[in-house]
Image: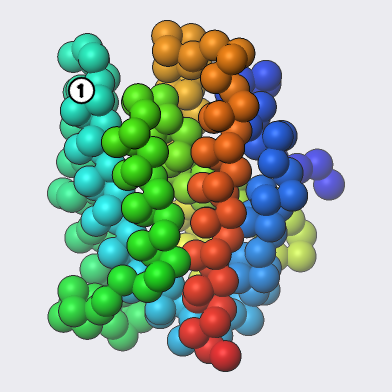
């Protein structure tokens, strides 16, 4: 069956993705992802992932606050503020409720220490944003924002994915759904818009380096979840 690849044909996201396919498939086809699809992922791994994903969201909220600072027009500030509000006013509350359904009380989430893998990726994103411009920051965010949609859409389209009776069905449906698909599409479109304004072919090699590193760190975030059950 054909693979679902997000982003406009020939757009920056597809170019960056294509430049690091080994790392990309190591992330999007990781054993954690495969076990989600099969419904065989140890629950301890998923619970640990959920807690760390909440802490991850907090740092991503900071990244979008940084995006507002790095923006140079009102439209970009407004978009960054919207993303920040979506995380702080919406996603964090949804995540707490999702964790509760998995038997994880909010107090446990808030008191949990950040795992090394969580710190590694989120601080890398913030560092790239601080050291570079808005395009650097958005490229560092893209493997997560766009990658989750690609992962879930491909899994839900694959005949081997277990849907009925899969304890992780809600996760799969959430990230493969139209609402999150629109978020991912918007992120891919933003890359093209900012590359046209701030980029050049001369910047491509450095952007590929950022995208590759962020993708590798995403794979390590999955591995963190698997390691919890070992």
Per the image, label 1 sits on a secondary structure element best described as helix
Does 79 sit above or below residue 194? below
Does 188 sit above or below residue 40? above
Residue 44 lies, in percent from the top left, at 46, 86
Outermost residue, right side: 1
Among the 4 quarters of the image, the one containing residue 73? top left
In this figure, which residue is indicated by the disc labeled 1?
Answer: 77
Q: Nearer the viewer, residue 165 or 19?
A: 19
| Quadrant location of the C terminus in the rendered image | bottom right
Does 7 sit above or below residue 228? above
Residue under the point 20% across and 60% down: 93
Among the 4 quarters of the image, the one containing residue 125? top left
Among the 4 quarters of the image, the one containing residue 179? top left
Does 123 sit above or below residue 54? above
Residue under the point 36% across and 62% down: 119
Residue 154 visible at all: no
Q: Is residue 138 left or right of residue 31?
A: left
Residue under the point 31% across and 85% down: 103
Residue 68 lies, in percent from the top left, at 21, 28
Q: Nearer the viewer, residue 81 or 99?
A: 81
Q: How is the image coloured?
A: rainbow
Residue 169 lies, in percent from the top left, at 52, 67
């Amino acid at each position: 069956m054909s693979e679902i690849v997000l982003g406009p044909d020939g757009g920056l996201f597809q170019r960056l993705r294509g430049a690091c396919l080994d790392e990309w498939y190591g992330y999007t086809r990781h054993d954690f992802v495969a076990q989600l699809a099969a419904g065989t992922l140890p629950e301890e791994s998923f619970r640990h992932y959920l807690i760390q994903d909440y802490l991850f969201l907090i740092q991503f909220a900071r990244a979008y606050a940084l995006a507002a600072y790095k923006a140079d027009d009102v439209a970009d500030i407004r978009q960054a503020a919207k993303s920040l509000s979506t995380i702080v006013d919406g996603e964090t509350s949804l995540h707490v409720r999702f964790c509760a359904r998995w038997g994880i009380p909010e107090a446990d989430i808030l008191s949990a220490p950040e795992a090394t893998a969580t710190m590694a990726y989120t601080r890398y994103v913030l560092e790239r944003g601080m050291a570079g411009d808005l395009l650097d920051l958005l490229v560092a965010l893209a493997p997560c924002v766009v990658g989750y949609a690609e992962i879930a859409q491909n899994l839900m389209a694959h005949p081997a994915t277990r849907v009925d009776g899969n304890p992780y069905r809600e996760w799969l449906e959430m990230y493969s759904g139209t609402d999150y698909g629109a978020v991912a599409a918007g992120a891919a479109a933003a890359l093209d818009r900012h590359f046209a304004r701030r980029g050049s072919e001369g910047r491509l090699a450095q952007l590929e380096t950022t995208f590759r590193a962020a993708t590798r760190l995403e794979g390590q975030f999955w591995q963190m979840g698997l390691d919890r059950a070992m």
